[in-house]
Image (cartoon, rainbow, N blue to C red):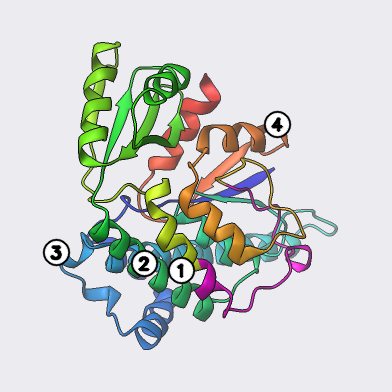
Amino acid sequence: MKAFLFPGQGAQTLQMSAEITAAYPASLSLYKEAQKITGVDLMNLTQEQLSQTRYTQLAIIVHSIASLEKERAGMEQLHDSVIGTRAGSSVPDSSSPVGLAGFSLGEYTALFASGIIDFDGLLALVNERARLMQLAADRHPGAMYAILGLSDEHVEVCLSKIKDVYPVNYNCPGQLVIAGTEAAAEKAAAELLVLGARRAMKLAVNGAFHSPFMAEAAAGLKEFAGTIPFAPISAASAGALYSNATAAPLSADIDIPSYLETHMISPVRFTDEIRRMRLDGYDEFIELGPGKVLTGLVKKILNK
């Protein structure tokens, strides 16, 4: 079975909007609509703007949706061309169910792809998410490090002995991102190198994302999300939507605003999520959005 994956913050490039609109001209309408909703011209961001959370999250979301629409248009065209030559063909079209998952911010694109939220609501939600996260990072400065070459268990044991630092992104076996205060994260990174980590790379962020330091922002997001209409998950026909927080499909009775609050302060369990999707029968993973970071992670996860 097929699954769509959507990338998160960090996948952006300065050329991505020009590239997707050249490859799929119909996506220009998405960028124009996004500018009406947010007041931001995502087609002409500077490098400085693209390094800021407020602009980056919107830019990645719109690019990912454009990539999704391009993929769906291609599926529909293939379906129609095959149906025209083979009666009774079972070739999937754009309405065929697929698995859906995203990495952090990418899970918001997955919400849209599932039919749970519309484009206007999504942009308003992501715009507020970015604002709240930046505010939280300014109030509670933090740091994040990618730890390479140690098992998750070794990292977790080390962090359990250090205050104010947490495991936050389980990218793939041997690659786990930690986050905390500047001092705590730096101390943890140094100790993990002593324990045998191959590298401890500091990420270009100023906040401890997906950690308890985002609690204030998460509460604000829950309140804002309560003003946005969400379709029931049971009514969405696009396929199962998998959770970063639990690695399992979201349940039909879940309260989306409350879930988004939990999502912001919970680790991204991408390794377990991909393994669960594979167990559930998904064997074709298609990354839709800028870059191919998730494609690389999936290969490492499923080859281990």
Q: Quadrant of residue 80?
A: bottom right
Q: Main secondary structure of the magenta part?
A: loop
Specify the label residue 279 is tagged with: 4
Up-down relation of residue 18 to residue 213 (above or below):
below
User: Sequence-wise, which precedes: disc 1 or disc 3?
Assistant: 3
Mark 3 vs 4, N-terminal side: 3
Q: Which residue is mark 1?
A: 220
Label pair 1/2, CB-CB below 8 angstroms: yes
Is residue 227 in the magenta section? Answer: yes
Label 4: state its secondary structure.
Answer: helix
Residue where numbered disc 2 is placed: 132
Bounds of the magenta segment: 222-243
Q: Of helix, strand and loop, which one carries label 1?
A: helix
Q: Give how far across and how far down residue 85 sits, in percent.
A: 74, 60
* In the image: residue 22, left or right of residue 304: left
In three-dimensional space, the C-alpha distance between marks 2 and 3, rounded to whole angstroms, equals 19 Å
